[in-house]
Image (tube, rainbow, N blue to C red):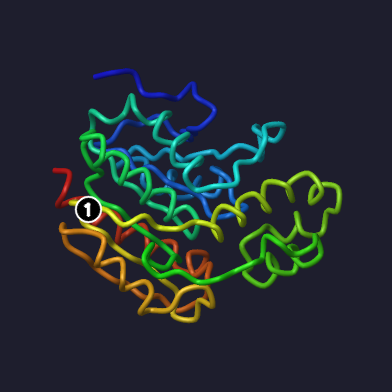
């Protein structure tokens, strides 16, 4: 087995216990790999958890933020190639679900295997497009959107100097998410599990259910009480769901 790619800027591993499979986590717009530290901590005895770190934030702050899902997917796949010879599962939240899907689609096109499962959270199916323009708002409008969705640490939103540093990455992420256009192709072959908050203003149950059209490997839709970041209130339930579904796929 090749050496895992833990020396790349794109991949973060918080714990060092190997598991029967690797869960690769893709953050939301404005998010960072550290968002998934609690997931890694909770699953450390069962699964290896790694998180993708996009350019323009935290220890990659000085790098140019990327502004397309294609760029993000290409960079993530390149970093993950040394792991393609072991069981991988993908979990992506919001924009991260689109990035995870595109990485899986690239693997299929390249005959480079497939994730054993794709968990897509808080994101409508690629074939369900909405016209959105948050990325075109001024800085105050962008911060107001972050506050509305409650996806950014309140301490960051109150720290003007920190906000100035991270707003370019946040704007780049929103640009990527809102300008993403699905290119029709063959469906994936892995199971897709879609998770959504029942009061999420960014995705309806119908839009989340349309992920079923993007795989021949089985589909499941799970709705949780809450909004776009329902994960904060249902972390244990989401982790248990991941563990349960992967237990049958990665013996």
Quadrant holding the N terminus: top left
Where's residue 157, x and y in %? 77, 59
- Residue found 49% across the figure and 81% down from its top: 199
How many dots with numbers?
A: 1
- Residue found 50% across the figure and 72% down from its top: 130
Where's residue 109, x and y in %? 25, 40
Quadrant holding the C terminus: top left
Q: Which quadrant would residue 82 be assigned to in this image?
A: top left
- Residue found 42% across the figure and 53% down from its top: 92
Where's residue 135, x and y in %? 67, 60
Q: Which residue is label 1 attached to?
A: 186
Secondary structure of the residue carrying numbered label 1: loop
Q: Between 199 and 97, which is closer to the camera in this rendering? A: 97
Q: Is residue 56 left or right of residue 197?
A: right
Q: Is residue 120 left or right of residue 67?
A: left
Q: Is residue 36 above or below residue 222?
A: above
Q: Is residue 152 left or right of residue 2?
A: right
The 10 Å Cα crowd at callout 1, few under 14, some 14 to 19, many 20 or more, is few
Q: Residue furthest top?
A: 2
Q: Is residue 147 left or right of residue 124?
A: right
Q: Residue furthest right?
A: 161
Q: Is residue 248 above or below residue 124?
A: above
Where's residue 155, x and y in %? 76, 57
Q: Between 31 and 179, which is closer to the camera in this rendering? A: 179
């Amino acid at each position: 087995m090749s050496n895992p790619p833990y020396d790349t800027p794109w991949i973060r591993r918080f714990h060092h216990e190997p598991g029967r499979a690797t869960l690769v986590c893709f953050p939301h717009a404005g998010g960072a790999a550290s968002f998934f530290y609690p997931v890694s901590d909770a699953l450390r005895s069962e699964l290896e958890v790694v998180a993708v770190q996009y350019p323009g934030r935290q220890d990659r702050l000085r790098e140019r933020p990327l502004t397309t899902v294609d760029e993000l997917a290409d960079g993530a796949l390149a970093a993950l190639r040394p792991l393609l010879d072991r069981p991988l599962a993908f979990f992506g939240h919001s924009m991260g679900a689109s990035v995870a899907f595109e990485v899986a689609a690239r693997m299929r096109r390249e005959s480079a295997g497939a994730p054993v499962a794709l968990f897509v959270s808080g994101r409508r199916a690629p074939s369900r497009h909405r016209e959105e323009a948050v990325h075109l708002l001024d800085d105050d409008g962008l911060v107001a959107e972050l506050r509305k969705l409650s996806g950014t640490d309140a301490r960051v939103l109150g720290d003007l100097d920190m906000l100035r540093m991270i707003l370019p990455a946040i704007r780049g992420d929103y640009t990527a998410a809102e300008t993403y256009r699905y290119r029709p192709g063959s469906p994936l072959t892995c199971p897709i599990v879609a998770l959504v908050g029942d009061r999420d203003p960014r995705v309806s149950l119908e839009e989340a259910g349309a992920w079923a059209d993007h795989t021949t490997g089985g589909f499941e839709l799970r709705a949780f009480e809450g909004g776009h970041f329902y994960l904060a209130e249902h972390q244990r339930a989401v982790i248990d769901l991941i563990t349960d579904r992967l237990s049958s796929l990665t013996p």
